Amino acid sequence: MGLDYGEEDFVLDPISEGVIRAIQLILSGDPEVYGITALSLFVSISGTLLSSVWSVPLSAVLAFRNFPGRGVIKGLFNALIGIPTVALGLCLYLLLSRSGPFGILQLLYTPYAIIIGQCVLVTPIIVSFTTSALESVDPDLRTLARTLGASSRQTDAVVLREAQWGVVLAVLAAFNRAFAELGVAMMLGGNIRNFTRVLTTAIALQTAMGEIAVSIALSIILLAIVVSLSIVINIARKSPR
Amino acid sequence: MILVHDPTSEYRFLNGSYGVNRRILADNFFIIVGSSQDSAGIAGKSPADALRQIRSAGLDGRAVWVSRGDNSGTYSKEVSLWKSIGLSTQQLRTEKWYLEAGSGMTATLQLANEKRAYTLSDIGTYLSNFDKHNIDLVTLIQANKSMLNVYSAIANNPHNANMTRANYAGAMQLIRYLVSDEGQQLFANYGVSNYGQALFQPYVPLVKSQSNQTLLGWIRELAFFEGSECPPQFRNNSEDLYLLQGSVLTFPTSYVLHFSSWAWIMERRILYWTRFQRA
Amino acid sequence: MISHLEAQGLTKMYDGSLALEQVDVRASTRQVTSVVGVNGAGKTTLLRILAGLDTPSEGKIVMDARELGVEELRTHCTMIFQKSVMFSGTVYDNVAYGLRINQSSKQNIQDRVGMALAMVNLNGFEKRKARNLSSGEQQRVAIARALALERAVLLIDEPTANLDPANAIIVEQIIRKSAESRVVLLSTHNLPQARRLSHRIIHLHSGRVVEEQDTASFFANPRDERTRLFISGELQF
């Protein structure tokens, strides 16, 4: 039943209705809602972690090594933080569609296309924030590590370790962006029920269908996850180790 | 006001006192499209047979169907088509070959195109996308009674307390225009220059000429409520809107005028009676 | 084991100006050698070059008759800075760092960290967060960090400039003790400290060595006019 079209009129105002519905959906363990939430988490976590694999080393290169064009590249990543998701979605859509260069992989309208899309989307965020975090580590720490016998690579590791919470926050910011975006998920995933329908696309659909209460319910779930993740990370950061 | 093509929902809308003064504007036909390979072999079949074949091919893994899945008018039609061959979408959505796009028509067509799947579409959106080379799906099933698509306009109910900000006067003005000769001509002309075919059949000339009784019968069956395009209890100060143009009875032309004036007198009596009842 | 560290003709140029010019240095185990001079004389630059953290424009560094390159220097020498920098983490993590990156065994690390902390009187501080300590305690952690590596040469830049007198005394004691088995070279502008701690003093002025004597002679009989002015506190630069 859960998200299906209901014929009830509003008893309360839409917001209260939405909150009540949200609690009902969560507590009743409605499989469709849980499925959508699980898929959202899977897709956004995968995309973020995948991006970290190259974003963090890239940030290390940008922060530690000097080379011509370094400033331009850093500026470029900063600018791409706010890339409109639909523009990115369109770009990748053209690449992944059947008539595009990567059409043969048949990734479009699968969760993997969304993962790829969100991975690209959050890369500038991770790179920009991480490079910043690495650059703000006290340069004397590098000198200290060297005089204690560290090789070049080991001093890089020291800086990374000192900046680790900066990296964590960068990854968290990236996840939030991926989790809450609509354009990429819609264009590359297609909002296919039980396959590529994530929280944001489901909210868009429910709103378009006039199911405001359900939209609010899903939005509350989305916000709850984002907020609680931030709280958990901040507690972990402050806790004595 | 709303422009809509989902008679079942429209009736609920009128019953819920959300709208008044419904007028049918035009009609055309839904189409079933798919890839030219037609893996389920439905070309030329009746819609019912086509859907059965698509399902069995789908269960076999040879075909995919994409549904709008968004409670739109097209989706309603799709649901009723499956229902007519005894299948509920509740059941179908659990089967692997049946995809619910949860999107608009263009997005659904793009998805179907990508997957080389079958889908139900209105002819206008299909042609528009086909023309732009966004999709290469082809029309496999067309005009047929069960594929009839009827477009209507409904004005907001001025007595509904939740809709006081809606522009009733403007809505009525627009509806009157759309059923006028000029407005109906718009429907007749639309698409001819771009696609070489008219995308809509205007309803008013169809009724005036009484030339296609079969089609009128289909429209009556699909889109009439309680025997009329707008039952009297849903009309509001608009008797003139339904004169001469609402009749679908098959009298020879010479009797039409006579009957119409009698109908007018009867309607006024019914109206007085219903008002009396409400008061 | 006695080691001798010798620098010959060290010269360093920065952006066209000479930070060091033909500097010769000699230091040995069991002797504390101080480099004194006004701010900007080049003391820190000299120490960094000896520590292998900077490359001289000219000159060479020899240890026990063997010339050492920059990489090798870093394995024989370690430097303690004027303002101590702590890694985030515990005192133990800080002191153990150099040993860990060398992949010493856990037992070995434990032993040496224990010994180093004992030498600086910080036993029991292992689990405390290094950055939460007072500056005096942090400086002692920095020294312990260097001691744990058991390098032949200890270079200390202004060891007590940032410390209160009580901590300064403790640190001086530690320096004296460390010198028993190491070459210790420190820089300071604190003349009484140089007098207290060192056996030999080098006066560096504008990048040049202007005086080098054993401590007693340095103060009793400075050969260079600038040294005399420096001792009396009147040296302009």
Image (cartoon, rainbow, N blue to C red):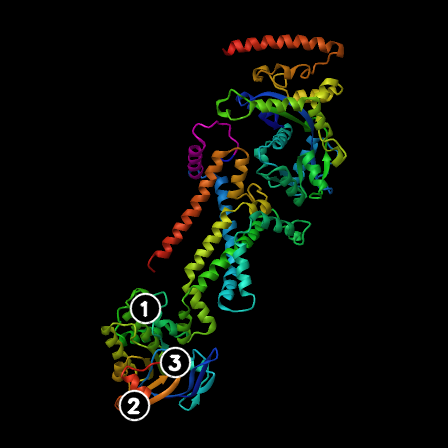
Measure the C-alpha gap from mark 1 to mark 3: 32 Å
Q: Which of B195 and B193 is in front in this view?
A: B193
Which mark identifies residue C91?
1
Mark 3–mark 2 CB contact (< 8 Å)? no
Q: Which kind of residue does numbered mark 2 sit on?
A: Pro
Q: Are marks 1 and 3 on the same chain?
A: yes
Which mark identifies residue C153?
none
Categorize mark 1 by other alpha carbons within 10 Å: few (<14), some (14-19), many (20+): many
Measure the C-alpha gap from mark 1 to mark 2: 43 Å
Residue B170: give x, y in percent of width and height. 59, 24
Residue span colored magenta: A4-26
Q: Name the residue under label 3.
A: C42
Categorize mark 2 by other alpha carbons within 10 Å: few (<14), some (14-19), many (20+): some
Chain on which label 2 sits: C
A183 relative position to C218: left or right: right
Categorize mark 3 by other alpha carbons within 10 Å: few (<14), some (14-19), many (20+): many
Can residue A107 be seen? no
Q: Name the residue under label 2.
A: C222
**Badge 1 element:** helix
Instruction: Check residue A19 for magenta coloring.
Output: yes
C76 shown above or below B195: below
Q: Which of C17 and B215 is in front in this view?
A: C17
C136 relative position to B34: left or right: left
Quarter of the picture containing the N terminus of chain B is: top right
A54 shown above or below C180: above
Q: Which of marks 1 and 3 is nearer the N terminus?
A: 3
Instruction: Check residue C221 for magenta coloring.
Output: no
Residue B270: give x, y in percent of width and height. 59, 9
Measure the C-alpha gap from mark 3 to mark 2: 20 Å
Q: Which-is-in-front pick, marks 1 and 2?
A: 2
**Badge 2 element:** loop
